Image (cartoon, grey):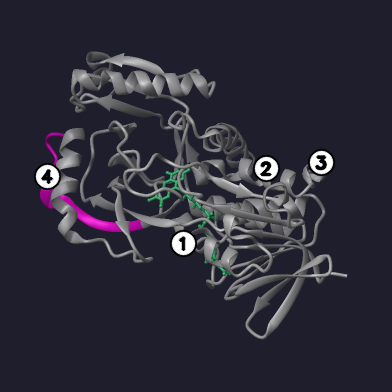
């Protein structure tokens, strides 16, 4: 008999959503994290945007899981009193020639069955946001914001209410199969489980490297792209999230607000070799330039380095964007194991849908209450 039915390695937003789904299905579940508290890596270093699902053409998992995850997330926030706002967003074409980029986004949205996008002339956009200087824009009413920490707290509470346990300061060093169970190495300790989900975010490929029996083809090469944010120390005259046309590697330095109304610009895309969250104050000029495209009257002296988050990327600079990679037994042939790689944006939005998919891959889908 295994010690527990299931172990989730990693208590970020994705691991917590999976832990809650496993617990709801009646499985005894441990959620382990190397840090003292849950959600202290990427899940608390992002834009906290609930994405509509309009950017992911050719990336079927991101497209499907974002749209489904967004619906599930709004419903979860409502039923669990998690603060959120359907604030809406404008994606703007600064010049008429960027209209073709908006056309492309409209086509992506249609392919993803997102039908609420509205094309706005420059005048219509200015009627909504008088300070935005643009040729035309798209309005996405189903884009929103959420308090990521409150969301994770609610997920953990849900998991615990169904019997799951979170254990911090518990770094899983490796996995091996012993008979029909998984044995997890944690320092001198060993824990066995029938199901293991590797939701270790930026370190998921490292744990995969230390998973006995997992073929090389199932350990992807992961690269890191830091996204830096600058905060604005003053009032910003906008009521929607404001996005430029996407850039390679990211959505373009945009303006988002947290639930308290504080505005921040970012994230940009900076390829790095190792995890390091330092925001280089020297990037200020490029942030001021990007922010000026959104608001020409920005006061550069009020732009201050804020924080950064790191994307785990499955493709490198100049390569086409990669999809999420969620490998279950159907891929690597190891029963009871699911590895999640490249869960960058829109991973927060998609978290509940990712959990559904993981349950299906483990053969437990029907048992979700
Ligand atoms: C700059 C930026 C902006 C983003 N903005 C958005 C957005 O607006 N909307 C959106 O939908 N998505 C956004 N995302 C994506 C989203 O933040 C991520 O997809 C999501 O947070 C990933 O969650 P996770 O649980 O997979 O990883 P993480 O939150 O990184 O959690 C992984 C956990 O695993 C633990 N861990 C690692 N190794 C081990 C081990 N060996 N043993 C035990 N524990 C371990 C870590 O301590 C960590 O807590 C953004 C991402 C970035 C980088």
Judged by depth in the image, the label closer to the viewer, 2 or 4, is 2
Query: Mark 2: which secondary structure?
Result: helix
Q: Earlier in the sequence, mark 1 or mark 2?
A: 1
Residues at discs 1 and 2 in contact (Cβ within 8 Å): no
| Label 1 Cα crowd, 10 Å radius (few <14 / some 14-19 / many 20+) | some
Residue hosting label 1:
41
- Name the spot of residue 191 as percent of width and height, x first: 74, 74
Judged by depth in the image, the label closer to the viewer, 4 or 3, is 3
Left or right for 180, reference 34: right
Q: Earlier in the sequence, mark 3 or mark 2?
A: 2
Q: Which mark is residue 252?
A: none
Instruction: Specify the quadrant that holds the C terminus.
Output: top right
Residue hosting label 4:
299
Residue hosting label 2:
357
Q: Earlier in the sequence, mark 4 or mark 1?
A: 1
For label 3, being within 8 Å of ligand 1 is answered: no
Of residues 249 and 125, which is closer to you in this image? 249
| Label 2 Cα crowd, 10 Å radius (few <14 / some 14-19 / many 20+) | some
Query: Mark 3: which secondary structure?
Result: helix
Q: How many marks?
A: 4
**Residue at the right extreme, as displayed:** 1
User: Can you say whether 231 is above or below 11 in the image?
Assistant: above
Residue hosting label 3:
366
Q: Residue at x 55, y 33 (%)?
A: 60
Q: Quadrant of residue 66?
A: top right
Residues at discs 2 and 4 in contact (Cβ within 8 Å): no
- CA distance separating discs 1 and 3: 31 Å
Q: Earlier in the sequence, mark 4 or mark 3?
A: 4
For label 1, being within 8 Å of ligand 1 is answered: yes
- Name the spot of residue 122 as percent of width and height, x first: 23, 16
């Amino acid at each position: 008999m295994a010690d527990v039915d299931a172990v989730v390695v990693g208590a970020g937003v994705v691991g917590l959503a999976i832990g809650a789904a496993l617990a709801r299905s009646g499985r005894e579940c441990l959620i382990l994290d190397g840090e003292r508290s849950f959600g202290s890596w990427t899940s608390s270093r992002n834009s906290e945007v609930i994405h509509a699902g309009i950017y992911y053409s050719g990336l079927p998992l991101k497209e499907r899981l974002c749209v489904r995850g967004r619906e599930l997330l709004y419903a979860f926030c409502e039923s669990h009193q998690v603060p959120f706002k359907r604030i809406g967003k404008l994606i703007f074409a600064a010049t008429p020639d960027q209209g073709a980029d908006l056309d492309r986004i409209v086509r992506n949205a249609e392919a993803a069955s997102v039908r609420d996008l509205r094309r706005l002339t420059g005048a219509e956009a200015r009627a909504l946001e008088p300070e935005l200087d643009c040729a035309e824009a798209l309005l996405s009413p189903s884009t929103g914001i959420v308090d990521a920490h409150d969301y994770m707290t609610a997920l953990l509470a849900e998991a615990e209410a169904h019997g799951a346990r979170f254990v911090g300061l518990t770094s899983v060093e490796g996995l091996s199969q012993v008979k029909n169970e998984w044995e997890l190495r944690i320092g001198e300790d060993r824990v066995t489980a029938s199901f293991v989900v590797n939701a270790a975010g930026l370190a998921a490929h490292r744990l995969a490297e230390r998973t006995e029996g997992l073929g090389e083809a199932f350990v992807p090469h992961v690269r890191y792209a830091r996204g830096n944010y600058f905060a604005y120390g003053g009032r910003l005259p906008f009521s929607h999230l404001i996005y430029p046309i996407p850039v390679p590697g990211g959505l373009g330095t945009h303006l988002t607000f947290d639930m308290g109304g504080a505005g921040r610009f970012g994230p940009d895309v900076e390829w790095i070799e190792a995890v390091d969250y330092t925001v280089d104050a020297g990037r200020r000029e490029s942030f001021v330039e990007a922010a000026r495209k959104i608001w020409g009257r920005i006061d550069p002296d009020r732009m201050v380095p804020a924080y950064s988050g790191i994307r785990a990327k499955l493709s490198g600079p100049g390569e086409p964007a990669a999809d999420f990679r969620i490998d279950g037994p159907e891929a690597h042939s190891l029963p009871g194991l699911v590895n999640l790689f490249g869960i960058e944006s829109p991973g927060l939005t998609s978290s509940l849908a990712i959990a559904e998919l993981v349950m299906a891959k483990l053969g437990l889908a029907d048992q979700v209450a």
